[in-house]
Image (cartoon, helix red, strand yellow):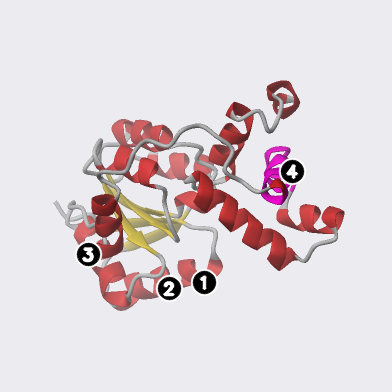
Amino acid sequence: MTIRQLIIADNQDISKAGLFFFAEKYKLYETIMEASDKKELIHLLGRGEPSVVVLDYTLSDFSSADELLILEERYPQTRWILFSESLSNEFLRRIVFNSSAFGIVQKDCGQDEILSALRTASRNERYICNRVSNQLLNARNEPVKKQENILTNTETEILKEIAKGKTTKEIAVERNLSFHTVTSHRKNIFRKLDVNNVHEATKYAVRAGIVDMMEYYI
């Protein structure tokens, strides 16, 4: 079966424009649609049309791999391409080994691999880019990380603010730091914790006692 509908769920304008360009130039899909958030994506999938969804998980409002797996079971006619800058080893294992509906390609991959992912998904097959394949192979024998705070004092304080729902701009203003500095801290925090987004980072903060659970839910 050939899938002719593409749904782009990516809030990064430059990558969204690139996906539109590739899909139209190479005539990969007859219909191209956009979903700005999870609610809109589910609405489009609910129409029942076989679709390929290109999703930037790290910028989305999905909170876990389990959410995606549940959605994949609910809409089995859908193929997924996870299109992000980076994804944690734990997340990749969960997704790759539990469903063949998810292809993965990183945003810094070359044009050939991005096109291969789009073409392969339209044929109802899966494509995993070389970098992610190597990441999974290298992580195969990694020990499970212990739940401990491996952040610096500054990173811990910034994580606390992130968990309280403050934006990068707000944190920068309150701490008299540049936006770039806070962004760098944020990337380091996500890398050290092996998480993909604010939801996962917040869960870590609660488990590690960095943020009080009651304070988080208020």
> Looking at the image, which residue is at 30% across and 41% down?
93
CB atoms of marks 2 and 3 within 8 Å: no
Q: Is residue 104 left or right of residue 2?
A: right
Which mark is first along the chain, 4 or 1?
1
The image shows residue 165 at horizontal and vertical percentages of 72, 41
- Main SS of the magenta part reads helix
Q: Is residue 20 left or right of residue 159?
A: left
Residue position marked by numbered label 2 in the rendering? 18
> Looking at the image, which residue is at 73% across and 38% down?
164
Q: Give the structural element (helix, strand or loop) at label 2.
A: helix
Closer to us: 113 or 25 = 113
The nearer-to-camera label among 1 and 4 is 4
The image shows residue 159, relative to residue 110, as above or below, that is above
CB atoms of marks 1 and 2 within 8 Å: yes
Residue position marked by numbered label 1 in the rendering? 14
Disc 4 crowd, CA 10 A, few/some/many (<14, 14-19, 20+): some
Query: What amino acid is at disc 3?
Result: Arg
Q: Is residue 170 magenta?
A: no
Residue position marked by numbered label 3 in the rendering? 119
Q: Is residue 6 left or right of residue 210?
A: left
CB atoms of marks 1 and 3 within 8 Å: no
The single residue placed furthest to the left in the displayed view is 1
Residue position marked by numbered label 4 in the rendering? 161
